[in-house]
């Protein structure tokens, strides 16, 4: 069966509860498709008000300065923290927080996990409902090898278009319930907004449900299956733009990421970086 994918590489197919899923996927088509992560690398954080207030529906975006320095985001670190939201860590420590968005499985998660295990690095995988349904053994492996599994929502919708807290919570709860059914463990209460789409109300809802929201301070265009970046292109972005306190977003669907992960981790280590988990942000 051929599975249609959105621009984040997430499967667009009906999952559980077909009628509900179909309606949500239709909403995703009108509100979310074609937005995705298209501009997150080069977007200058120009939508932040002078007092750091987050404007209403936004695409998460970054503005980059000198090599090795932290980028600016759509909202200030202090403002995000009011909603238990984060995008970057301490600028004085050469630390990396490694995260992966997992929308579906195509054979590249295993080599990524192999490299993480070799380097004794714990990461966070943000999963959607389709991933849980189709790759439960890999989800179990993530847990067994000490990784955290976070919530990327069940249907990977533009959550900023959902005004109802009940609908928002259902997207979150369905992931948590299926994760527990598969692993016997509670889902880690970390949330990553699909497509990088968010609003102040979304952040409030996530906080009220007990979640910490995690954006990112470094990512690159790695999700197009028919246009994977070369090793050189990947290293140019991921080595050239690495910075202290980086929350790195990669996609586990990327063949390039699977092929370079061991060498990439080695390079970052040679540059003096160490790795920590997102638990540092929630202490």
Image (cartoon, helix red, strand yellow):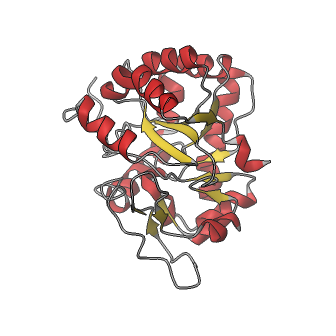
| For residue 202, above or below residue 178 | below
Residue 230 versus residue 26 in the image, above or below: above
| Residue 136 quadrant | top right
| Vertical comparison of 172 with 201: above or below | above
Residue 164 visible? The answer is no
Residue 246 visible from this viewpoint: yes
Residue in view at x 59 percent, y 84 percent: 51
- For the image, the number of numbered tags is 0
Pinpoint residue 75: horizontal percent, then vertical percent: 54, 70
Pick the front one: 51 or 207? 51
> Which image quadrant for residue 223?
top left
Quick one: which residue is furthest to the left in this view? 226
Viewer-proximal residue, 118 or 83? 118
Tell me residue 212's x, y (percent). Answer: 68, 52
Most extreme residue toward the right is 283
Residue 271 screen position, x and y as percent: 48, 35
**Rendered location of residue 151, percent (x, y):** 60, 42
Q: Residue at x 53, y 85 (%)?
A: 50
Q: Which image quadrant for residue 147?
A: top right
Please name the residue shown 71% across and 49% down the image.
281
Q: Quadrant of the N terminus?
A: top left
Instruction: Give the left or right position of residue 22, taking residue 269 as reference.
Output: left
Above or below: residue 186 compared with residue 32: above
Q: Residue at x 54, y 14 (%)?
A: 118
């Amino acid at each position: 069966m051929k599975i249609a994918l959105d621009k984040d590489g997430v499967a667009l197919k009906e999952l559980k509860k077909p009628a509900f899923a179909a309606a949500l996927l239709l909403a995703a088509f009108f509100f979310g498709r074609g937005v995705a992560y298209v501009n997150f690398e080069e977007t200058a954080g120009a939508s932040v008000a002078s007092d750091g207030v987050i404007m209403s529906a936004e695409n998460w975006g970054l503005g980059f300065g000198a090599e090795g320095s932290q980028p600016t985001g759509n909202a200030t670190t202090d403002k995000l923290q009011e909603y238990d939201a984060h995008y970057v860590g301490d600028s004085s420590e050469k630390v990396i927080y490694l995260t992966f968005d997992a929308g579906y499985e195509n054979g590249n998660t295993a080599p990524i996990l192999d490299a993480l295990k070799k380097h004794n690095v714990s990461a966070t995988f943000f999963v959607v409902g389709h991933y849980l349904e189709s790759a439960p053994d890999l989800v179990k492996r993530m847990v067994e090898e000490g990784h955290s599994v976070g919530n990327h929502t069940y249907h990977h919708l533009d959550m900023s278009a959902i005004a109802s807290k009940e609908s928002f919570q259902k997207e979150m709860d369905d992931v948590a319930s299926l994760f527990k059914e598969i692993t016997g463990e509670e889902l880690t209460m970390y949330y990553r907004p699909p497509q990088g789409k968010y609003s102040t109300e979304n952040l409030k809802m996530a906080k009220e449900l007990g979640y910490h929201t995690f954006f990112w301070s470094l990512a690159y265009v790695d999700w197009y299956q028919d246009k994977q970046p070369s090793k050189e292109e990947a290293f140019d972005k991921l080595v050239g733009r690495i910075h202290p306190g980086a929350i790195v977003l990669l996609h586990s669907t990327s063949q390039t990421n699977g092929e370079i992960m061991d060498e990439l981790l080695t390079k970052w280590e040679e540059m003096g970086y160490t790795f920590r988990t997102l638990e540092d942000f929630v202490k």
